Image: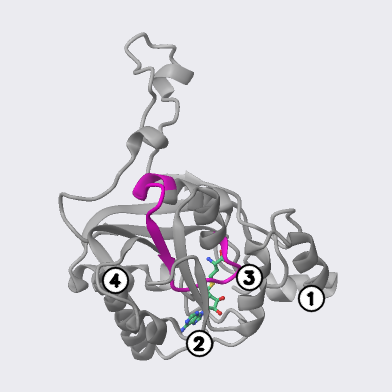
Amino acid sequence: MEVNKVYLGDCIEIMRTLPDASVDLVFADPPFNIGIKYDVHNDNMPYEEYYKWSEKWIKETYRLLKNNGSIYIAIGDEFAAEINIILKRTGFYFRNWIIWYYTFGQNQRKKFNRTHTHILYFTKNKERFTFNDNNIRVPSARQLIYNDKRAKPIGKIPDDVWQFPRICGTFKERIGKHPCQMPEDLLELIIKTSSNEGDLVLDPFGGTGTTAVVAKKLKRNFITMEISKEYYEIIIKRLDGKVEEIKRNNKIEPEKQKKLFDFE
Ligand SMILES: C[S@@+](CC[C@H](N)C(=O)[O-])C[C@H]1O[C@@H](n2cnc3c(N)ncnc32)[C@H](O)[C@@H]1O
């Protein structure tokens, strides 16, 4: 199988062409079905249609994952419960329901501001999976606050609430018009935890290519898919290091900025 490849097209159709048990880690940040204005994808499917579509692509990731593989799915409040059920029904084992708490959430008019996304972490096997705890340890409160002599010098495994800023329209890391770019630091934590150098990381919903870029940086192989030609070309250029060129060609006019990112 060809790796380090970006596919242009529908992820379900493309995944169906790939061999069983070939992937070590899946990270998926699917459209949340909340009416975001993507280039091609309709983010306003009827409930049943979105549910069945989610079942289909999750089933394909299950087939593609090796027996010791892991999957992380980012999802909004609206469908987090459904995706959790689909993962269980597909045969995956639950490990964590991670909350990504982000600063710079969207302001709301008649409800509390949303400042989190769910990241559901499951494995294909109940006992055997990659979890590189020594690559991700952070200083514990015992070390940092209490200066407690009992504190383990190697620190602790991070908590299941993660804080990374959302990549807003004005941020340096932002590539351009794509409405949902993930922070590289978040992908780095997932990839370091659940894969090793040389492993294969799959992201069925490429977007701006964050997963592929971080996998490449961390010496993992990657495969990613994107249905929009415009976004696909952004991924290819980003992987080529042409970030300034992408930014020049994808400038967001200030008056359009609010419309594009203030989708809730
Ligand atoms: C939430 S975004 C992913 C953003 C990505 N994590 C990033 O950091 O840039 C979801 C992406 O999935 C793409 N998409 C939607 N349906 C798809 C499909 N059937 N196959 C492949 N890509 C699809 C959309 O065009 C969109 O770019």
User: With 46 as the anchor, is 230 left or right in this view?
Assistant: right
Identify the magenta region: 192-210
Q: In which quarter of the image is the N terminus?
A: bottom left
Q: Check mark 1 vs ligand 1: CB closer than 8 Å? yes or no.
A: no
Q: In which quarter of the image is the C terminus?
A: bottom right
Spatial CA distance of label 2 from label 3 is: 28 Å
Q: Is residue 255 magenta?
A: no
**Residue under the image location 57 percent in, 71 percent down:** 207
**Looking at the image, can residue 70 be seen?**
yes
Spatial CA distance of label 3 from label 4 is: 23 Å
Task: Mark 1 vs mark 3: give the one in front.
Answer: 3
Q: Residues within 10 Å of mark 1 (few under 14, many from 20)?
A: few
Q: Nearer the viewer, residue 25 or 50?
A: 25
Q: Which residue is identified by label 1?
A: 256
Dot 3: element: helix
Q: Which amino acid does label 4 sit on?
A: Leu
**Residue under the image location 33 percent in, 40 percent down:** 132
**Residue under the image location 38 percent in, 40 percent down:** 159
Q: Contact, CB < 8 Å: mark 1 with mark 4?
A: no
Spatial CA distance of label 2 from label 1 is: 21 Å
Pick whichever of labels 1 and 4 is earlier in the sequence.
4
Pick whichever of labels 2 and 3 is earlier in the sequence.
2
Q: Which residue is identified by label 4?
A: 64
Q: Which of 122 and 4 is in front in this view?
A: 4
Give the number of the disc on residue 44.
2
Q: Contact, CB < 8 Å: mark 2 with mark 4?
A: no
Q: Is residue 198 magenta?
A: yes
